[in-house]
Amino acid sequence: MQRANYRIMDINELCRKIKSCTNCKLHKSRKNAITGEGNFNTGILIIAQAPGKDEDRTGKMFIGPSGKIFDRLLLNAGIHREDIYLTNLIKCYLPKCRRPSKNEIEQCSVYLDKEIEIIDPKLIVALGFHTTRYILKKYNLDRPPKNEYKNLFGKLFYADDRIIFPVRHPTAILFNPEKEEIIQENYNMILKLLP
């Protein structure tokens, strides 16, 4: 059996575990645990923070207001969703779109770690603060004080034959449209970073 077939089985099994997860209290308030989606044979893994209300309702990734901005950023960079694998650090909706707790990250990151193992990406694009902080910690990379994370966006880090590329989450544009130009420049780099 080819490696791709094993990946399909591994991803399908992982998705079943995510959908039935009760590891933290978020399972009590969610409608859907959101699994990753896209091309699992890609070299690009993009990791967002957590699903929003629209994603929780429909069970699909990035379909709300942030998703529309995300799609525009990708399209302008010449990237199609079917060319990447897209997932979240936290698989369940965080009520009132609050920040994830340390316990929620610890409980949920086991799924992300497994996705990274299965997908084996050359490039990990971490969207936003919490995802970037988790990925830097996972790969034992230096982590600055919280107020300095904004300086990491658009910079490259290297670990375990992978490129780590933190960028701002598309939601940043909803709150500050002036950031779109610099964020788009970061997204434009994604395809150029692969060998």
Image (cartoon, rainbow, N blue to C red):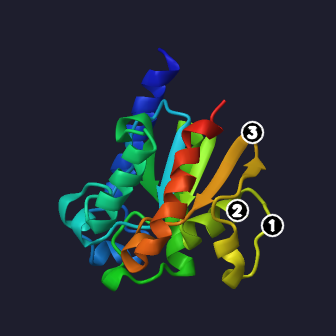
Give the residue at mark 1. 142
Give the residue at mark 2. 136
Viewed as shown, does residue 62 lie left or right of 58?
A: right
Q: Above or below — where is 157 with respect to 109?
A: above
The residue carrying pointer 3 sits among few (fewer than 14), some (14 to 19) or many (20 or more) residues within 10 Å by Cα, namely few
Q: Are marks 2 and 1 in contact (CB under 8 Å)?
A: yes
Q: Nearer the viewer, residue 93 or 167?
A: 167
Q: Position of residue 152 (x, y in %)?
A: 69, 66
Residue farthest top in this picture:
1
Element type where label 3 sits in the image:
loop
Instruction: Tell me what residue is drawn at x 48 percent, y 78 percent.
Output: 100
Q: Position of residue 142 (x, y in %)?
A: 80, 66
Please state which amino acid type lies under the numbered disc 2. Answer: Leu
Please state which amino acid type lies under the numbered disc 3. Answer: Asp
Q: Above or below — where is 52 with respect to 68?
A: below
Q: Position of residue 41 (x, y in %)?
A: 48, 30
Element type where label 2 sits in the image:
helix
Q: From mark 3 to mark 1, how far is it between C-alphas?
A: 17 Å
- Lower sequence index among marks 2 and 1: 2
Q: Quadrant of residue 175?
A: bottom left
